[in-house]
Amino acid sequence: MQSAKGKVTTQEQIRARAKELLEQKLVTAVLGFREGSLPGTVVPTLVTKPEQSDSLVYDERCLHNLAAYLPRLKHKGKLAVIASGPTSRSIVNLIKENQVKRENLYIIGVAGPEFHHKDTKAPSVRNRSRGTPNPVLCDEMVGDKAAEPAEDDYADIAAFEKLSPEERWQELTEDLSRCIRCYACRQSCPNCYCPTCFVDSSQPQWVGRTTDDSDTIMFHIMRAMHMAGRCVECGACARACPMGIDLMRLNRKVALIVRDRFGHVSGMSLDTPLPLACFQTDDKQEFIR
Amino acid sequence: MSDEQVPAPEFHPRIVAFLCNWCSYAGADLAGISRIQYPASIRVIRVPCSGRVDPFFVLKALQLGADGVLISGCHPGDCHYLTGNYVARRRFAVLNDLLQFFGIEPGRVMFSWVSAAEGERFAQVVRDATEQVKKLGPLNRLATSKTPFEDAMQTAECRVQKAK
């Protein structure tokens, strides 16, 4: 953050680049972060004028996955977007799912916000993907790259799976039964862009609208199913959850299933097809008789 | 009869079976016209292809009172729509693993490939499925809490049983 040694901070570089891009009319707007109205908070913002670019901030608080805004900003023309690792992976998925066009995006890559912390070197952030701090797809990189972490071993999932089925059911239902069905997880998720979400559909009404355990668990199983092969583990849903439900446990399990069964890690490359939209004739089928 | 105890009625599982129109449904038909006996535990829902089976169908069936779900389609490579069952297989793999992660017993939701020529195999699949779900007992996870009406019906049924 501090430019003590005369070094230009990432935030200053982002402001400068945003200004240039807007002045040269290379993009119509820059999607980034600004200070929120409550002290200590940041909110996503769309900067459209060069003189506004100094309102942009980038530090450890900028954890939102900005890709969630891209499908609904399609009509805005070419956008520049500040993207760290998970955000860039979400963008890759959105391009593959035909939700945004690559040529309509100018991706300003940055190392994850957790690496722009004032005090410590790389603090652990709740529910944040540990896999990719650096963008996998960008037009330019601003600031230094973060050190690549060791490969994720999904030890938390393996530990949970050691429990008996009864214990797992108990723990998961206890956790999920606190859900108040506010759908903040859905709203914050870049994967959730359906015009009519299955929870809003009334004909057929797939999920009951009560907070009855049965309905809630069904909602969460289906939400996890829809994340299969798509979730980039940015943790936006878990941070948005007002009840502090451990949503990442389900997301990570589904990501692990897809990785183990189909050898696919979500959002890492534009060239690999989406795992549930394709198949191999020799996919494992030990569970089918 | 000296004791007043009424033996617990035998558990007859209700299994919802999603059968693909081109293979498994025809297989079930063959089992029927060949007079092959199998338990009357399945409630068949005909779908155009196993690829039509949304995970929602499975969960909804369990939620609304099925004790088990059986999904059956064409053998890989034999799909009427060429690749429907291949794509479905990937989806089922994720669903199967996720349900087990949740602690739903393995065997509650069953998957099989049955061709139109395999009448005997279809009967065997249903026999095994029924046996398996019987062993697991009625579903107590995921099912929606009973409505007062259902509760009343159950109490009434118990009274009738006792009166006998």
Image (cartoon, coloured by chain):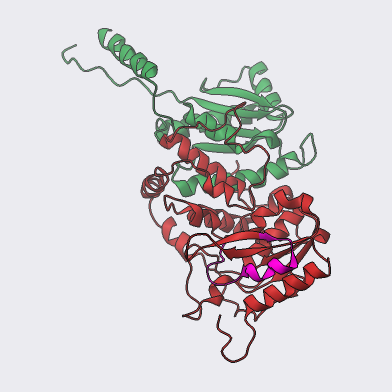
Chain colours: A red, B green
Q: Is residue A56 one of those drawn in magenta?
A: yes
The location of residue A150, given as percent across then percent down, is 56, 76
The location of residue B91, given as percent across then percent down, is 64, 45
Judge from the rendering whether residue A11 lies leftward or rightward of residue A80; answer left or right. left
The location of residue A269, given as percent across then percent down, is 73, 64
**Residue sitting at 44 percent across and 56 percent down?**
A161
The location of residue B61, given as percent across then percent down, is 53, 29
- Which quadrant would residue A86 be assigned to in this image? bottom right
Judge from the rendering whether residue A169 lies leftward or rightward of residue A248; answer left or right. left
Where does the C terminus of chain A fall, quadrant-wise?
top right
Judge from the rendering whether residue A201 lies leftward or rightward of residue A25; answer left or right. left
**Residue sitting at 53 percent across and 35 percent down?**
B59
Q: Residue furthest left?
A: B2
Q: What stretch is highlighted in magenta?
A: A46-65
Above or below: residue B40 compared with residue B82: above
Where does the N terminus of chain A fall, quadrant-wise?
bottom right
Q: Is residue B70 one of those drawn in magenta?
A: no
Above or below: residue A16 compared with residue A86: below
User: Can residue A198 be seen in the rendering of this structure?
Assistant: yes
